[in-house]
Image: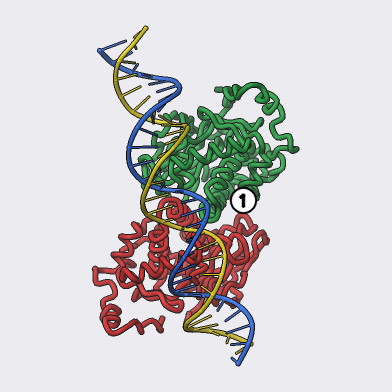
Chain colours: A green, B red, C blue, D yellow
Amino acid sequence: MQMGFAFTKLASRLSSIADLSDEDIEFLARMPTIISHFGSHETVMPKGERVSSCCLLLHGYLCWRDTEHGAGQITSVHVPGDVPDLHTLQTQRLPAHLQALCPVVVAFVPHAFFHQAASASLRISHALSLLAFADSACLRNWVVNLGTRASLQRVAHLVCEIALRLRAVGLAKDMRFASPFTQSDLAAACGISPVHANRIIQELRRRGLLQWQSRMIAIMDWHGLAALADFNPDYLWLRHPRDFLPATTDTVRNTQQATARPSAVSLEAH
Amino acid sequence: MQMGFAFTKLASRLSSIADLSDEDIEFLARMPTIISHFGSHETVMPKGERVSSCCLLLHGYLCWRDTEHGAGQITSVHVPGDVPDLHTLQTQRLPAHLQALCPVVVAFVPHAFFHQAASASLRISHALSLLAFADSACLRNWVVNLGTRASLQRVAHLVCEIALRLRAVGLAKDMRFASPFTQSDLAAACGISPVHANRIIQELRRRGLLQWQSRMIAIMDWHGLAALADFNPDYLWLRHPRDFLPATTDTVRNTQQATARPSAVSLEAH
DNA sequence: CGATCTGTTGACTGTTATCAACTCCGGTGG
DNA sequence: CCACCGGAGTTGATAACAGTCAACAGATCG
């Protein structure tokens, strides 16, 4: 799977929103971890649990889900490098079920380490605060998304967000990535019915904005998708958002050439 | 207006979610403030602004509004004692427009004071963290509300939340309080159209759950309203939520007796 | 006392949920 | 090897819900 050490994932994520020194990175390298694997839709931590370590996502996708089974609202989605439960450093109690959206690899990191890190370096302390508040900002943006946009735009916006967050930690370089969602999960995230989610995806495909087959998404027209979704990445608080946006309008030129042939067959790799 | 000193509002709010000592309260009493007044729908701080003080709400209601004019989504509502922009201690930039929902009184408190307070007392530091994360928890709950509940339930839920948060800081003792919302604001908070907001309110009135006239709300049947909304106050992280819930089913017995007469005339006071 | 904001109503339209059926796929066990 | 199964995706028909438009009533405020 070639994921390097756990701390590099965290360092990469922190660096996307804050400035870390080499010493800070060295400190993070001493992070004690317990690596765990979870299957798709397994509950990593149940709602209300008291915890004394945080969960650093290394591979795959996690989500916060309000009610455990099936159709409970998904309130946020997390990509590798995220620490979804960082706020448990202050509050301990989990506000919802932390659930795997696909097979995932996570590293449990003791609260104590984060407290040490925060005392050792003001920059790390600040970066961790930013990481926690960036989740708040995402949540606030998601309220806007649910409250003001029609379902087609909602889904487009979510796809844009996931893509950019992946690119911010060095993934999805070619605008192709494993989908965090089954269509039912997408519905649970966007507050629509699974049937409608299906029709929305079909519409996005029909418009040539993306391919979405067997758990792989390829964004064919980033600018079209972002325009449809009215996507503005400011709320992600990335230090250099432009580094992660496609450079020109020929977003996925290679992919488009590849798929100019008979039909779509280029969705295997990651 | 009889509001006491600014710090007592903050102390009351902090005490609702965390344990403060007398020394902590004394420290808070030394809080330097600049008192300001804003008119209804005035912008207290515009989106994107960099600030070096926080805004403690003393009287009235504030909200975060995504886009300035008219129909921009309201992402959260704040009651007296709240510090909506507490996270600017870490990030400075405002994530949305901070707007008055009615004539308000606020106290601007320098970031420096909060930093001092946090160094001076671990309890204060913890309480401030909780205050900030409680806003996150509200936001997460609001995503659930928008994503999973029908509009009638959404509005009912929001009314329950506001009522309980007011009671947690000693207001709305009789389940009657000034509404934070015009019907248009309510629509902007709940992601529905203003016309529909009007019809929802009528339905809530028709069911005998509340009175809502000229900016005053009186909850006539708390249990009915909470049941309709599927309201569970856990997400507010109150230390003693039961203290703020009505004791028995005869929620507003006095008010109900009053309004058993010809028509509703008992909504003036606060 | 007119201007403006807020609340209210009716008619119509469009979006989305729901229900039900069916396909496709991968895995599992006979 | 094949039958079966469950999960995921797809489709069509129908009904409920909510948005839009337009007009007007009532309140509030200069």
**Residue pictured at 55% horizontal, 32% vertical:** A212
**Residue pictured at 61% horizontal, 47% vertical:** A229
Question: Could you say where residue B122 lies in the image, as x and y percent from the top left?
Answer: 48, 57
- Residue marked by disc 1: A235
Q: Is residue B261 left or right of residue A173?
A: left
Give the crowd class for mark 1: few <14, some 14-19, many >=20 residues within 10 Å: some
Rendered view: B177 above or below A241: below
Asked if one can make out residue B125 in the rendered structure from this viewpoint, the answer is no
Rendered view: A197 above or below A230: above
Say which of A17 and B215 sits in front: B215
Instruction: Give the position of the N terminus of chain A as an image quadrant.
Output: top right
Count of numbered tags:
1
Asked if one can make out residue B162 in the rendered structure from this viewpoint, the answer is yes
Parent chain of label 1: A
Question: Could you say where residue A223 lies in the image, as x and y percent from the top left?
Answer: 68, 41
Q: Is residue A21 left or right of residue C28?
A: right
Instruction: Give the position of the C terminus of chain A as an image quadrant.
Output: top right
Question: Could you say where residue B69 lies in the image, as x and y percent from the top left?
Answer: 62, 66
Quarter of the rendering containing residue B32? bottom right
Q: Secondary structure at mark 1?
A: helix
Quarter of the rendering containing residue B202? bottom left
Rendered view: D21 above or below A71: below
